[in-house]
């Protein structure tokens, strides 16, 4: 049992079928744990990184330079495989046996959370397409979310913040936030970030490249959703039972 002033942090949350296995747990001070989730939500690391990258597209430094289009493309391509679970050690996830009385309820909840976060990511992608294409500003909530994340990590440059997210360790020396991620995936993410140099968004049609990148990512999410997202309709009975129990 963890000490009263510490929590066990599930890097891949229960709501995404994350297991309470050693490979998926890090030990964090309660205040730090609560602040992290308040800033970032409750998502697996790859979902968080993709959403942060898309949300950071309007960012510029004091000289008008932005995170390079090529790095966005490489990072999003790496983090959007046909099956997002392949980015993690297999022991990260609960094994489905079919014998657990609560398994149907757990699967239904995971179905809802995956669908909800995929919808949010698609919506944010569309916000940024609108910002670039017709100069519509993203919703205020998206801007506030980015500010919460930057304040938590005390970094504002996207590549620096993400390197901290991938490298920061717990008192045991394990990665705090990405412990269950496959090491070759983490190394490649760090390589891309390390080799990325800021560049002017207006040079060489950079904004047009970002626009196309966002269109491609949205299309990829639509395609991936067919495999990533269990059909909510398949779990409607379980979800309705949960609703009726709360209404009693």
Image (spheres, rainbow, N blue to C red):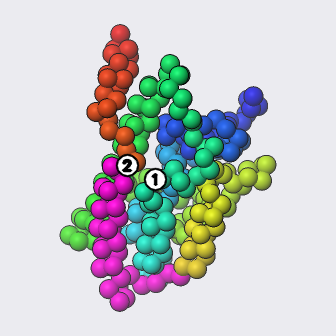
Can you tell which mark lies on residue 227? Answer: 2
Q: Can residue 3 be seen in this view?
A: yes
Segment colored magenta: 197-226
- Horizontal side, residue 245 vs residue 153: left or right: left
What secondary structure predominates along the stretch shown in magenta?
helix
Kindly identify the residue that appears in the image at 59 percent across and 69 percent down: 188
Kindly identify the residue that appears in the image at 38 percent across and 14 percent down: 245
Q: Which residue lies furthest to the bottom in this view?
A: 204
Query: Which of the image's four quarters has the C terminus?
Result: top left
Residue 235 placement: quadrant: top left
Q: Is residue 160 visible?
A: no
Query: Which of the image's four quarters has the N terminus?
Result: top right
Kindly identify the residue that appears in the image at 42 percent across and 77 percent down: 69
Kindly identify the residue that appears in the image at 36 percent across and 55 percent down: 224
Tell me which label, 2 or 1, sits earlier in the chain: 1
Q: What element carries label 2?
A: helix
Q: Where is residue 191 in the image (x, y as percent from the top left)?
A: 61, 74
- Residue contact between numbered discs 2 and 1, judged by CB atoms under 8 Å: yes
Looking at the image, residue 9 lies above or below residue 177: above
Q: Where is residue 228 in the image (x, y as percent from the top left)?
A: 40, 48
Looking at the image, residue 218 lies above or below residue 60: above
- Within 10 Å of the Cα at label 2, are there few (<14), some (14-19), or many (20+) other Cα atoms? few
Mark 1 = which residue? 83
């Amino acid at each position: 049992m963890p000490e009263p002033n510490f929590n066990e942090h599930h890097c891949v949350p229960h709501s995404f079928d994350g297991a309470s296995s050693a490979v998926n747990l890090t030990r964090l001070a309660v205040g730090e744990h609560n602040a992290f989730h308040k800033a970032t939500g409750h998502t697996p690391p790859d979902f968080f990184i993709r959403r942060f990258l898309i949300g950071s597209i309007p960012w510029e430094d004091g000289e008008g330079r932005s995170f390079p289009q090529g790095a966005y493309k490489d990072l999003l391509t790496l983090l959007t495989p046909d099956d997002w679970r392949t980015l993690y050690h297999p022991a990260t996830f609960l094994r489905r046996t079919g014998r657990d009385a609560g398994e149907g309820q757990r699967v239904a909840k995971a179905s809802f959370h995956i669908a909800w976060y995929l919808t949010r990511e698609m919506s944010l992608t569309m916000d940024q397409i609108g910002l670039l294409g017709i100069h519509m500003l993203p919703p205020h909530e998206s801007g506030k979310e980015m500010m919460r994340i930057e304040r938590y990590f005390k970094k504002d440059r996207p590549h620096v913040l993400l390197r901290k997210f991938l490298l920061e360790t717990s008192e045991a020396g394990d990665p705090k936030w990405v412990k269950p991620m496959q090491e070759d995936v983490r190394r490649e993410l760090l390589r891309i970030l390390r080799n990325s140099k800021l560049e002017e968004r207006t040079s060489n049609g950079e904004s047009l490249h970002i626009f196309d990148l966002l269109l491609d990512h949205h299309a990829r999410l639509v395609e991936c959703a067919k495999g990533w997202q269990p059909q909510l309709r398949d779990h409607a009975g379980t979800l309705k039972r949960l609703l009726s129990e709360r209404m009693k």
